[in-house]
Each structure stands twice: as structure tokens, then as C-alpha cells.
Image (tube, rainbow, N blue to C red):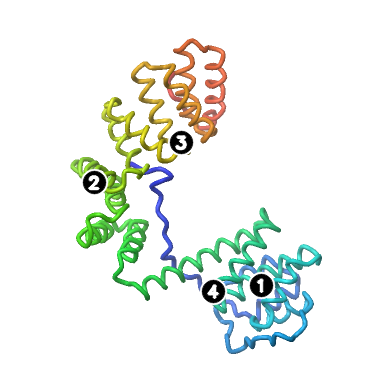
């Protein structure tokens, strides 16, 4: 199954919002026991009543961290959010700042205060970049924000090309290939020159497991249409190059890989594809530079090291080649097999 690599990945933002059956009062009980991880388990419950949240007068002094956390646990988010931000910027203990940030994300989402949610996420990321509880909270916060934004799009512009595109990508992620294809084709009926749609349809044709023998050629035509509309689409150039390389047409593939690299200098797979083609054409010295670039960008890719080692060995750089073969062996030692040299 053909994949469009990192440039062909799709963003599925039409996620289902999480709902839990744990009442918020249980969260308060757990928090009082200093059980932050348990509090996170209740984090997404939607039972906080906005009616409980009375905005704090502007003249009210800044609350203490403990008072702010207590108000947030009671669902009084309008009063607590400013003080929770203040707590995260203060010198209180790390666990208090962490609890303030977690409650701040929950409260700001409950009030649909997306600016404050973003701010709490930034503060948590900066202060606790590797904390698993914090990362858990951030994952679900982004999921919630994604869902809300998708709902905004569906409500405000349901017939827009963007809404159809989002729906198509969601259907594709769910493996509903026929429905997704119809969405892409419906978009093209509205406007044949929308950037990216021919690329997405071509990728779908190559990705679906039930694709027939004609799918590759149709996909190729979609990618060609895409670069007619948007010559800078590096993903389309790359897949055209891969299709040609797999057909052993490296003279056609190399220019496509070069175009992909021109428009995306960090496209590791395009460097690798160009290097593989040059090795197959026995242009070993020419293959080394793109393979070095692929190695720099993806040092953990065994295929890159093996191909680079082959190019180095056959161009007379035996000592360097052996180093690359050694790296390849170490990377594949637990995989059960190695590429032939």
C-alpha cells in the first residue's frame, strides 16, 4: 500500500468528545487526597455548570494558589482562572503549579475560553515538558479543541470546500474509502483547480486496500493534475518519483525527487529515493550527497545506511562504507533480517 510519507499524512480533527461517568465531586475528593493522576481521570467530565461560574470583579485582589484551586474544584471557574494563571507564574511548589495548570485547562475548556486554554497549555508545556500526567492532559485538550473547531466549521460553513475536505479526510481515516472518494470528487465538481484535492484523491487511490489494477495509473494522473495546479506540491512530486522508481524508470523518477527536494529541503524520503535511483544506475559517487542528507534527516532509518554504505563501498570509500554497514547491522539486529549487500 503506497503511503505519501510525512507530507501525505492527514489530520483527523473530527474526533468524538470524551465523556466519563465520574461526577465532579469525586474529582474534588481525589484532589483533596493530593491525587493529581486520579484527578486527571475525571478531567474531561462535562458536569461543571456554567451557572456556578460568577465572574470576579476587577477590583478583587489576586487569590492565593490554594484558594484558586479550591474554587476551581468547586466549579467556580470564572473566579479561579486568573488566579490559576498567577499561581503558575509564582514560586509555589511544582506540584501546586501543576495542579493549577491542570485545573486551568479544565476550567477554561468548560467555559470555552480557548485563549486561556492555549495559555495554560503553553505554561504546562514549558514547566513540565516531560511529565506524563501533563502530556496526557495536553493530548486531550488538543483533541477537545480540534473537535470544537471542526464543529465551528460544520456549523458556520457546512457547504464550504474546507468542510467537505475535512469530512473526506475523516472518512478516509475511518477506512470509508468510497465515501471519502465521493467527497473529494464532489469538491472537484465544484472547482477543478482547488489546491491539494487532486493530491488527496491520488493518495486515497493508492492507500485503499481494495484498489484495483487501474488505481495506480489513475492516481498518477491525479498527481500530474496537482502539479499543474500547484507546481510546489512536494508530496505529489515525491509520489510520482516513487511510482516511476518502482517501475524501474529512474530517469523519470530522479527529476521528480529533485523537484520534491527543491520545494521541501527537509524531505528525507525524496533524498533516499534519489539515492536509490542513482545507485541502481551505478552512479555511486553522485548517490552519496543525497544519501548523506537522508542520513542527517533520518539517522534511524536502516535503509538509508545500507544504501549509503553500498554507494560508498562501490565508489571506493571502503572504511566509510564499513561504518555505515555497521550502523545498519545495529539498527536491524532486532528485526530479524537485513537488506542484502
Element on which disc 4 rests: loop
Residue holding disc 2: 225
Q: Where is residue 22 in the image (x, y as percent from the top left)?
A: 59, 77
Mark 4 vs mark 2, foreground winner is 2
Q: Position of residue 322 (x, y in %)?
A: 55, 16
Which residue of the protein is positioned furthest toward the top in this rendering?
316
Mark 4 vs mark 1, foreground winner is 1
Query: Residue at position x 60%, y 61% from top?
Result: 136
Residue holding disc 3: 268
Sequence-wise, which precedes: disc 3 or disc 2?
2
Residue holding disc 1: 103
| CA gap, disc 1 and disc 3 | 41 Å
Q: Give the left or right position of residue 290, taking residue 252 as reference.
A: right
Mark 1 vs mark 3, foreground winner is 3
Mark 3 vs mark 4, foreground winner is 3
Element on which disc 3 rests: helix
Look at the numbered discs 1 and 3 and tell me whether their residues touch, using CB distance below 8 Å. no
Q: Residues within 10 Å of mark 2 (few under 14, many from 20)?
A: many
Element on which disc 2 rests: helix
| CA gap, disc 3 and disc 2 | 24 Å
Look at the numbered discs 3 and 4 and tell me whether their residues touch, using CB distance below 8 Å. no
Image quadrant of residue 6? top left
Q: Where is residue 308 in the image (x, y as percent from the top left)?
A: 47, 22
Above/below status of 40 relative to 58? above
Sequence-wise, which precedes: disc 3 or disc 4?
4
Q: Residues within 10 Å of mark 3 (few under 14, many from 20)?
A: many
Query: Residue at position x 71%, y 78% from top?
Result: 29
Residue holding disc 4: 20
| CA gap, disc 4 and disc 1 | 17 Å
Look at the numbered discs 4 and 2 and tell me whether their residues touch, using CB distance below 8 Å. no
**Which residue occupies the foreground of this view, 254 or 282?**
254
Sequence-wise, which precedes: disc 2 or disc 1?
1
Amino acid at each position: 500500500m503506497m503511503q505519501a510519507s510525512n507530507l501525505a499524512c492527514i489530520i483527523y480533527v473530527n474526533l468524538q468528545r470524551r465523556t466519563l461517568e465520574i461526577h465532579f465531586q469525586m474529582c474534588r475528593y481525589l484532589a483533596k487526597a493530593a491525587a493529581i493522576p486520579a484527578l486527571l481521570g475525571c478531567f474531561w467530565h462535562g458536569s461543571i455548570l456554567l451557572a456556578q461560574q460568577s465572574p470576579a470583579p476587577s477590583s478583587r485582589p489576586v487569590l492565593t494558589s490554594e484558594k484558586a484551586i479550591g474554587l476551581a474544584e468547586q466549579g467556580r471557574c470564572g473566579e479561579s482562572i486568573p488566579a490559576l494563571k498567577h499561581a503558575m507564574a509564582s514560586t509555589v511548589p511544582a506540584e501546586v503549579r501543576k495542579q493549577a495548570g491542570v485545573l486551568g485547562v479544565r476550567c477554561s475548556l468548560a467555559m470555552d475560553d480557548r485563549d486561556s486554554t492555549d495559555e495554560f497549555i503553553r505554561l504546562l508545556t514549558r514547566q513540565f515538558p516531560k511529565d506524563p500526567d501533563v502530556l496526557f492532559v495536553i493530548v486531550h485538550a488538543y483533541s477537545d479543541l480540534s473537535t470544537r473547531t471542526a464543529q465551528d466549521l460544520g456549523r458556520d460553513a457546512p457547504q464550504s470546500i474546507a468542510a467537505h475536505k475535512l469530512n473526506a479526510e475523516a472518512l478516509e481515516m475511518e477506512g470509508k474509502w468510497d465515501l471519502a472518494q465521493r467527497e473529494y470528487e464532489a469538491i472537484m465538481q465544484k472547482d477543478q483547480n482547488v489546491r491539494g484535492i487532486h493530491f488527496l484523491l491520488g493518495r486515497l487511490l493508492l492507500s485503499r486496500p481494495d484498489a484495483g489494477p487501474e488505481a495506480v495509473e489513475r492516481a498518477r494522473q491525479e498527481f500530474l493534475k496537482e502539479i499543474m495546479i500547484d507546481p510546489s506540491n512536494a508530496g505529489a512530486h515525491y509520489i510520482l518519483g516513487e511510482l516511476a522508481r518502482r517501475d524501474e524508470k529512474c530517469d523519470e523518477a530522479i527529476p521528480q525527487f529533485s523537484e520534491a527536494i527543491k520545494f521541501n529541503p527537509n524531505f528525507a524520503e525524496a533524498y533516499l529515493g534519489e539515492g536509490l535511483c542513482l545507485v541502481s544506475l551505478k552512479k555511486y559517487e553522485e548517490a552519496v550527497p543525497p544519501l548523506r542528507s537522508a542520513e542527517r534527516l533520518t539517522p534511524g532509518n536502516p535503509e538509508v545506511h545500507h544504501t549509503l554504505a553500498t554507494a560508498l563501498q562501490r565508489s571506493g570509500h571502503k572504511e566509510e562504507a564499513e561504518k555505515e554497514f555497521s550502523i545498519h547491522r545495529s539498527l536491524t539486529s532486532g528485526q530479524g533480517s537485513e537488506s542484502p549487500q
